[in-house]
């Protein structure tokens, strides 16, 4: 059974639309039709294997902090993956919990926090087949790009 962390950079107008109509989240991630205005799937999507991310986070927490409880050790990673529950979207569920949104200010704080925690600030790779970022190493660069662009983020685990 796989678990996939899905993230999308969205503009503020689309963020407000998502908050008003959470069903738009499904259009962003799963519809093959017309993408919502202000959203470019080829450049604004991120995905990584959540089980791999979880295993690496647990291993790092054990090695660095002598605790496998990564959610206690890495609060910015927890925020970046929607694990803290503080920004859940009522009315939309992924396979493994609710969707979450972060506004541009929150995205900037998370990007800085991820850098401080040492998460994935190597060179971001692109999957040539579909344009999506792949691999947990690219989580930090994805958030940094969203912060530079003044974007919000919507995501969840499917």
Image (cartoon, grey):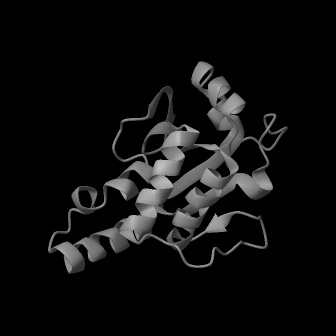
Residue situated in front as seen by the camera: 142 or 3: 142
Q: Relative to 107, does residue 66 appear above or below in the rendering?
A: below
In the image, what residue occupies the spot 50% across and 57% down? 111
Q: Position of residue 68 (x, y in %)?
A: 20, 68
Seen at 72% across and 72% down, the residue is 127
Q: Is residue 3 left or right of residue 148?
A: left
Q: Nearer the viewer, residue 37 or 54?
A: 37
**What residue is drawn where x is 62% and y is 78%?**
123
The residue nearer to you, when weighing 139 against 121, is 121
Q: Residue furthest top?
A: 20
Quadrant assignment, res 64: bottom left
Vertical position of residue 115 compared to residue 14: above or below: below
From the top left corner, tell me how far across and down residue 81 is, in percent: 44, 52
Where residue 140 appears, as percent x and y from the top left, is 52, 65
Q: Position of residue 66 (x, y in %)?
A: 14, 74
Q: What residue lies at 71% left-to-right and 29% top-to-bottom?
A: 13
Closer-to-camera residue (103/30): 103
Residue 74 visible here: yes
Q: The N terminus appears in which quarter of the rendering?
A: bottom left
- Is 142 above or below relative to 60? above
Name the side, left or right, on which 56 lies relative to 17.
left
Left or right, residue 40 beside residue 118: right
Q: Does any portion of residue 158 appear in the rendered image?
A: no
């Amino acid at each position: 059974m796989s678990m996939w962390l899905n993230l999308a950079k969205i503009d503020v107008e689309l963020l407000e639309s998502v908050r008003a109509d959470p069903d738009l989240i499904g259009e962003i991630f799963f519809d093959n039709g017309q993408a919502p205005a202000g959203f470019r799937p080829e450049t604004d999507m991120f995905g990584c294997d959540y089980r791999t991310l979880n295993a690496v986070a647990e291993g790092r927490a054990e090695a660095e902090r002598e605790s496998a409880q990564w959610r206690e050790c890495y609060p910015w990673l927890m925020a970046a993956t929607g694990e803290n529950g503080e920004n859940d979207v009522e009315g939309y569920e992924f396979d493994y919990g609710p969707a979450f949104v972060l506004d541009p200010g929150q995205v900037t704080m998370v990007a800085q926090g991820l850098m401080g925690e040492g998460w994935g600030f190597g060179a971001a790779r692109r999957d040539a087949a579909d344009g999506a970022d792949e691999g947990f190493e690219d989580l930090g660069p994805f958030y940094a790009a969203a912060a530079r662009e003044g974007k919000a983020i919507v995501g969840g685990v499917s």
